[in-house]
Image (cartoon, rainbow, N blue to C red):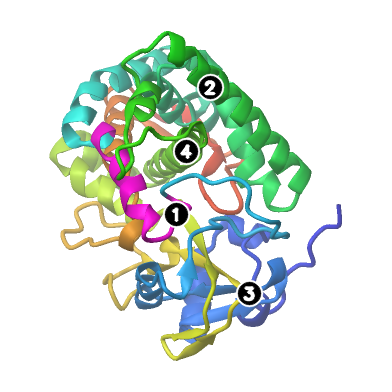
Amino acid sequence: MNKPVPVTDWKHDFDHTDPRWTENPYPIFDELRAECPVVHTNRFLGVYLPTTYEAVKQIAYDTEHFSSRRIIVRNVRPPITQSAPPITSDPPEHKSAKQLLLPPFTPDAMKKLEPRVREICNELIDQFIDEPTVDAAARYTRHIPVRAIAHMLGIPEDDGDLFIKWIHEILEVGITDDEVLMRAIQEMAVYFSGHIAERKTHPTDDLISTLMNARDKDGQPLSDMHVLGSLRLLLIAGIDTTWSAIGASLWHLAKTPADRERLVADPSLMPTAIEEFLRAYSPVTMAREVIKETSISGCPIKPDNMVLLSFPAANRDPAVFPDADKVLIDRKENRHAAFGLGIHRCVGSNLARMEMTVAIEEWLKRIPDFRLDPHGDVKWSEGTVRGPRQLPLLLGKSR
């Protein structure tokens, strides 16, 4: 596979998989935002990037000119054969597909799940708390949402390594390798089809059975393909995103002892801190496909292009967030877009907030002192979801 040509002109030739973007995209956002509210590249068959909060918001709310049928920017655009409702649905189908997924993610449902998430966090910490160093990404952050969603779906938590493999292949490798992407999607379909078939003869009270028992707007049961698509969505959208957000939060606290000490001394700051971590280190960049010509913030937008809907760029826009590049854990006004905007705002936001809060609370209770390991490298994921995939930490007070 040919290596992509390094970017020399971000305004006319950006690449969201470039190592410099992966390492630290925020100066790139600032540079582009100062130039133009929407920039374009011919890479990936043509992609626009809105750089301001207002431009991102306009696109997110505009379902006439922008379709959600493709949500990942890739090197190819084959015919659409797989869906993940409601995230890949457009109106009018979107509304009913989303309503089916709302009940399992209510605040009350999260309160019932929270004790298990706290157990998961402590079970993980038990395995490394007596060690002087730990890769917190490999041994903590990535396992929390995997096990939580497995618990909700009623599938073995030990299958988590499979989910992690599929997510890596779909969201990272699959951007440039169609064969790997399709294999991962097929493996996932076979796996979940087995669980669907099992529940037809042995019903349970888990989330898979809830979807199988649901009815569409016409009172008809959902097709197996619809159930399969929704399960694919929960796995892809509900795991990588949250482990990235938890990891980025721990990374910030590891390199910012003043914030870490404030949170340990005053846990009442946790809600505003979590919202600020979500704003400052938003993990998710979604995509839209341009289906009709239009203009956004005065910039012409042509069909047959994709759009990188960068919520991370929107959340660093100084026109909306004072001191946008500062992380202020007591920030009061914080209408961030980490969970998206418009009809596709994240259905699992209550789950993500709960998992983040519990993960940071339990870590700080048991490991109040930690810092980045100067002998290790932090490695960030590239593409649609950005978060630390390697996070080496030193545990305990510095000696």
Q: In whole angstroms, how far apart are the C-alphas of marks 3 and 1?
A: 18 Å
Q: Is residue 284 above or below residue 248?
A: below
Query: Is residue 358 left or right of 209 when viewed as pictured?
Result: left
Report the residue marked by disc 2: 160
Mark 2: give few (<14), some (14-19) or many (20+) Cα within 10 Å: many
Majority secondary structure of magenta residues:
helix
Res. 11 visible in picture: yes
Contact flag, marks 3 and 1 (Cβ < 8 Å): no
Within 10 Å of the Cα at label 4, are there few (<14), some (14-19), or many (20+) other Cα atoms? some
What secondary structure is found at the residue carrying circle 2?
helix
Residue range corresponding to the magenta coloring: 87-104
299 shown above or below 343:
below
Residue at x 59%, y 46% (from the top left corner): 381
The residue under label 1 is which amino acid type?
A: Ser
Inspect the magenta stretch and tell me whether residue 95 lies in it: yes
Query: Would you name the residue on which mark 4 appears?
Result: 226
Distance (Cα) linking label 3 and label 2: 37 Å
Please identify the quarter of the rendering in which residue 296 is found: bottom left
Residues at marks 3 and 4 touching, judged by CB atoms closer than 8 Å: no
Q: Nearer the viewer, residue 141 or 74?
A: 74
**Disc sitting over residue 112 in the figure:** none
Q: Secondary structure at mark 4?
A: helix
Pick the residue in front: 387 or 207. 207
Whether 147 is among the magenta residues is: no
| Residue 185 in the image: above or below residue 386 | above
State the residue position of label 1. 89
Which residue is disc 3 drawn over?
A: 304
